[in-house]
Image: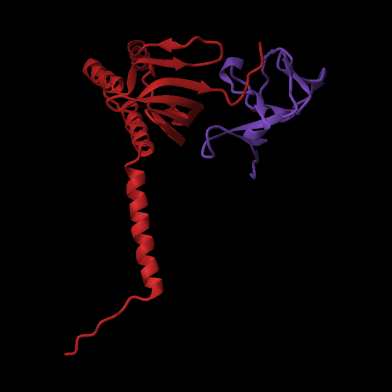
Chain colours: A red, B purple
Amino acid sequence: MPHSQRRLGPAQIALVVAVVAAAGAAYLWWDSDERRVHRRLDSLAAVLNDRSTGELGMISRAAQLAGYLTDDATFDPGRGAGPIRGRERLLALASRAPSDGRDFRVDFLDVTVRVAGEAATTRLTATLTTLRDRSETEMVDAREVEMAWRRTDDWRIARITLIDALERPQR
Amino acid sequence: VVGVRLAGWRVMYVKRIVGLPGERIEFRNGTLVVDGREIVEEYLQRPSSWTTQETPLGSDEFFVVGDNRSMPVEQHEFGRVKRERIAGPLLF
């Protein structure tokens, strides 16, 4: 049988080039520092949503959370309340909330990441969804949050600042 | 009633605009007061007892508040907001 050869047309060549370029861009994006910070946020949310209970579960969760914070991490709740400084104090705070036993879920949405050298900043909306026991109605609290990250052994959070979208009046 | 943007477009506060740029807003024992005039808010289902100081609004600021004011004032998200955060009116 005669062996037939087909030559690629211009449209097909353009398609191949576009696919290769898209694959390259996707790889670069996946491997970028921006993407690494995104992945750290996703895994942080998973740790915060961990349902482990009991003393062992709390110790395990605290150990995992410690890996996301720098030693001098600071939490600034705003609204006149002073910042809370130090990883150990923040971990003690995180281990207590939420403390009333209700089912809850933390999500980080609308995330923007900016990387500059060994530092990064994320702006996001954090939501806390809680389920009311009797009515099973979902209640969602949302706050805008800015996080300052520092690259050490991995990307770690150095500062968490709650941003007020609305400026409350004085009472 | 408008959507107020947070960090992006997926999550928004739904609030009512009760103050326009240049106005002065306060609550007196639950009653909304705009530029010294008490406002009757017929859309409210439950009364509140909120009291706040007068808040003057800048040229690009609005005052927004939710219609459910049955909770203590410190548990409600309301106040001045920059024009750039207002996404627009709700369509439903």
Q: Nearer the viewer, residue B89 or A68?
A: A68
* Residue A121 position by quadrant: top left
Taking B60 as reference, is B35 above or below it?
above
* Residue A93 position by quadrant: top left
Q: Position of residue B80 (x, y in %)?
A: 67, 24
Q: Nearer the viewer, residue B66 or A7?
A: A7
What number of labels is visible? 0
Q: Could you tell me which quadrant the N terminus of chain A lies in?
A: bottom left
Q: Could you tell me which quadrant the C terminus of chain A lies in?
A: top right
The residue drawn where x is 19% and y is 89% is A2
* Residue A122 position by quadrant: top left
State left or right for residue B14 relative to residue A13.
Answer: right
User: In the orientation shown, which residue stands out farthest toward the left?
Assistant: A1
Q: Position of residue A111 (x, y in %)?
A: 45, 35
The residue drawn where x is 55% and y is 32% is B6
The residue drawn where x is 70% and y is 17% is B30
User: In the orientation shown, which residue stands out farthest toward the front?
Assistant: A117
Q: Position of residue B8 (x, y in %)?
A: 53, 37
Q: Position of residue B87 (x, y in %)?
A: 63, 39
The residue drawn where x is 67% and y is 35% is B1
Taking B50 as reference, is A49 above or below it?
below
